[in-house]
Image (tube, helix red, strand yellow):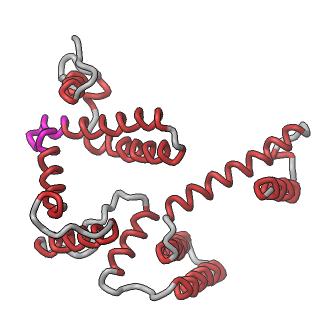
Amino acid sequence: MTIPTKDLPGLLALMRSLRDPETGCPWDREQTFATIAPYTIEEAYEVAAAIEDGDFPHLKEELGDLLFQVVFHARMAEERGLFAFPDVVATLVGKMVARHPHIFAEVERPENAAAQTEAWEALKARERAARHASILDDVPRALPALMRAEKLQKRASKVGFDWDSAPKVVEKLTEEANEICEAQAEGAGPEKLEEEVGDLLFVVANLARHLKVDPEKALRTANAKFVRRFGHIETSLKAAGRSCEEASLDEMEALWGEAKKKERE
């Protein structure tokens, strides 16, 4: 079988072949929306990582992987008679046209990107009102928890439910941290401690929003910094013929300090 390699019909044909009940791939045939969803999320993060690294050849590959996820879901939906890929495209185009009246209808054009964002949010608010939905209803539950927390808080702030400054959030942060210590001192169980830690993380996300910091990006940067500095500890100990298991905490902290110093030089 020859599959066209550079157009969307070829990709759709490829997907049909992979899912063919008789001649398709056993793994692809067995997949469902639920089993594929984690891969979809993973591929979206791979796209973000390629952009963050400035690795555009890799970005090309990752965008293809993400597109394949869309095609996979659309094919499964078509098999169940729910919708097909052209319906996905039609819905997307219809939504984009409706949300860009300044391009596709005779309305005043926003002055800048900020004004456009405000107009976009107002339009989505009218759409929610027409559905009699809560302002929080369409914040996706599948988002990473830290990202969803930031989006929930941002949405609530639109109706005035928000602290008025970052210092107020820091006060709440201290309060939540103290509550964790108090709960631990009182012998609280895992569920209570999980609740208190969750409250603390929720406030951290709010602080990031007030400071106009992307909490997901900030945590990714912190993760990368940790990996880099811990790598220095491992490399230094290995050069001395030792392992982390053989080193004391004081030794490893000293090497951590070395890594910090080198980064600042």
Please provide percent x and percent y for residue 148: 39, 65
| Left or right side of 47 for 208 | right
Of residues 59 and 81, the one drawn nearer to the viewer in this rendering: 59
Q: Up-down: is 135 above or below 83? A: below
Please provide percent x and percent y for residue 259: 79, 53
Please provide percent x and percent y for residue 131: 12, 71
Q: Residue furthest top?
A: 1
Q: Residue at x 30, y 84 (%)?
A: 159
Which quarter of the picture shows residue 124? bottom left
Evaluate whether residue 121 shows in this view.
yes
Q: Residue at x 66, y 81 (%)?
A: 185
Of residues 25 and 162, the one drawn nearer to the viewer in this rendering: 162
Majority secondary structure in the magenta region: helix
Which quarter of the picture shows residue 142? bottom left
Please provide percent x and percent y for residue 49: 49, 45
Report the quarter where the C terminus lies.
bottom right
| Left or right side of 254 for 40 | left
| Left or right side of 92 for 195 | right
Evaluate whether residue 192 shows in this view.
no
Numbered range of the magenta stretch: 75-88
